[in-house]
Amino acid sequence: MAADLAKRHPEYALQKLVVSEAGASVYSASEFASQEFPDLDVSLRGAVSIARRLQDPLAELVKIDPKAIGVGQYQHDVNQVALARTLDAVVEDCVNAVGVDVNTASIPLLARISGLNQSLAKNIVEFRDLHGSFRNRDQLKKVPRLGDKTFEQAAGFLRIMNGDNPVDASAVHPESYPVVQRIVGRLGVDIRTLIGNNALLKTLSPRDFTDERFGLPTVQDILAELEKPGRDPRPEFKAAVFKEGVEELKDLQVGMILEGTVTNATNFGAFVDIGVHQDGLVHVSALANKFVKDVHNVVKTGDIVQVRVLEVDEKRRRIALTMRLEDAAVAVVTAKPDAPRKPQHMPKPKQESKPVMENAMSAAFSKLRQK
């Protein structure tokens, strides 16, 4: 339907996108989803979650346990407590690096902010629903149980867009506002004129605004933030362009060159979504024209890559791909039953004195036992 609409109205320059649904069913059946959409069916909650991922992936994916997204290798073979703690730390780092709009953020997103927890995040949302949008960061101190220490930890990561003070929309902490005021006084301009004015900010020397309380690194960070207030550290949004007419496994032909998105990177290769509802595997030996010691040195989840179809097995729903585009394709494995073979005498294998266990799984287990 989306593709047909884009064809009928080329003047709108519409783009067809495919969004990963990993973990959407976990969210739709969660307690938070039932609170967000009490009157919606489970399937519709999942559809809303998938659509929101395109709008703001971070804000939506924080509602799901990271383990439910299913990215990674052997996640069930490691210490689950250590895994959960590490994943939580990574998610918290991501959320704090990006910052959140305190007037639109959900409870799970606010709970990831440094200094906040589930209870305080709920209090912020309830205060916002009762009193309306926050106009400045000082209003956060009126939220029940949000004390001075918590405010000190969290304020720099909570952004207020279009509020009373334009600096509230940046990563500049309220404690550093005196430096901003000194900068404004030195230049004799309005703060709204100063923010984003790179030419004007480049004329300043950070050392002129240092004192016993604010050192040189702090002042440099403040000036950098004023140049690009509230900047989003995520890269420019790009999406793979899937080949027209290739929508099912049966549409694939050996030798096709397609564009896809890396959905998972493991020790043995990378899985790539090419738009046929089944990810293809690029074996580690087919990632580059050189020896690849670590897959993550070549690709990572979310990368857009060009691949050639090497082999298609419709019966087992397996697709072999290569990123070495000059590689010759191999024959297609169809769903036809194997032809009967005559029994042949097979020599007995030689007995080895010791079993050979050098694959990745056994190596991982041996490391766990040593720990």
Image: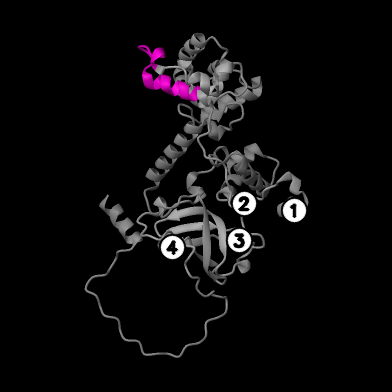
Quadrant housing the N terminus? bottom right
**Residue that numbered label 2 is attached to:** 18
Residue 267 falls in image quadrant? bottom left
Mark 1–mark 2 Cα distance, whole angstroms, equals: 17 Å
Mark 4–mark 3 Cα distance, whole angstroms, equals: 21 Å
For marks 2 and 3 on the same chain, the one whose residue lies earlier in the sequence: 2
Q: Is residue 231 visible?
A: yes
Q: Element at badge 2? A: loop
Q: Amino acid at mark 1?
A: Lys
In the image, residue 215 lies in the stretch drawn in magenta: yes
Disc number for residue 286 = 4
Place of residue 348 in the rendered image (x, y in percent of width and height, measured from the top left): 30, 84
Which class describes the residues within 10 Å of circle 2: few (<14), some (14-19), or many (20+)? some
Q: Amino acid at mark 2?
A: Val
Q: Is residue 194 left or right of residue 132?
A: left
Q: Amino acid at mark 4?
A: Ala
Identify which residue is drawn at 40% across, 21% down: 218
Q: Element at badge 4? A: helix
Of tags 3 and 1, the one toward the viewer is: 1
Image vertical order of residue 30 relative to residue 149, above or below: below
Disc number for residue 7 = 1
